[in-house]
Amino acid sequence: MGRILVTNQILNRMKKYVVLTGILLMGIAVLPGCKKQGCMDQLSKNYDSKAKEDNGSCTYEGRVVFWYKQAVADQLAADSIQTLNYFLDGVSVGSGASSVAWPTSPNCGENGSITVNRDLGTTKKKDFGYVVKNEDGFEVFSGIVTIEANLCKTVEL
């Protein structure tokens, strides 16, 4: 009877090892299926080159530059307008002398330009209303601009 008891104990231990080994092997088999999640869109500001599965966390930003040619600057001077104040969706984003004109569209961020960076959230493009007012608060220009991820949108006034 002592030998049967020892044999049963050995069998019970072996069963536990077999079960634990099976669980361990299943865990190892599942691990390669787990993929690193993250933003996989290279246009986003939080792109993760190591991500293997997109988790919808991508966020975007874009820019817009406002400009006008010399003829507009001359007209503003004729109307005694010296300063322009720029607003995007009602928020002040900059101001500049009305005499600053460009022969062609400036690059975003170019010295002397009115360039605005905007967070687009999780969308790749978004519409913004803009208003340009003179120093007395009167509207001179207005419109809607669509800002797109990773692009510099130009708006000629």
Image (cartoon, rainbow, N blue to C red):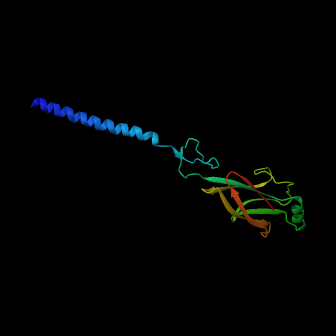
Quadrant for the N terminus, please.
top left
In percent of width and height, residue 27 lies at 38, 40
The total number of labels drawn is 0
Rendered position, 43 above or below 75: above
| Nearer to the camera, 157 or 82 | 157
In percent of width and height, residue 40 lies at 58, 47
Rendered position, 120 above or below 48: below
> Does residue 80 appear left or right of residue 139 in this picture?
right
Residue at the far left in the pictured view = 1
| Nearer to the camera, 32 or 71 | 32
Quadrant for the C terminus, please.
bottom right
Residue sitting at x 34%, y 39%: 23
Residue at the far bottom in the pictured view = 138
Q: Quadrant of residue 4?
A: top left
> Does residue 120 appear left or right of residue 134 in this picture?
left
> Does residue 118 appear left or right of residue 20 in this picture?
right
Rendered position, 20 above or below 88: above
| Nearer to the camera, 15 or 140 | 15
In percent of width and height, residue 2 lies at 10, 30
Residue at the far top in the pictured view = 3
Residue sitting at x 20%, y 31%: 10
In percent of width and height, residue 77 lies at 89, 64
> Does residue 94 appear left or right of residue 120 in this picture?
right
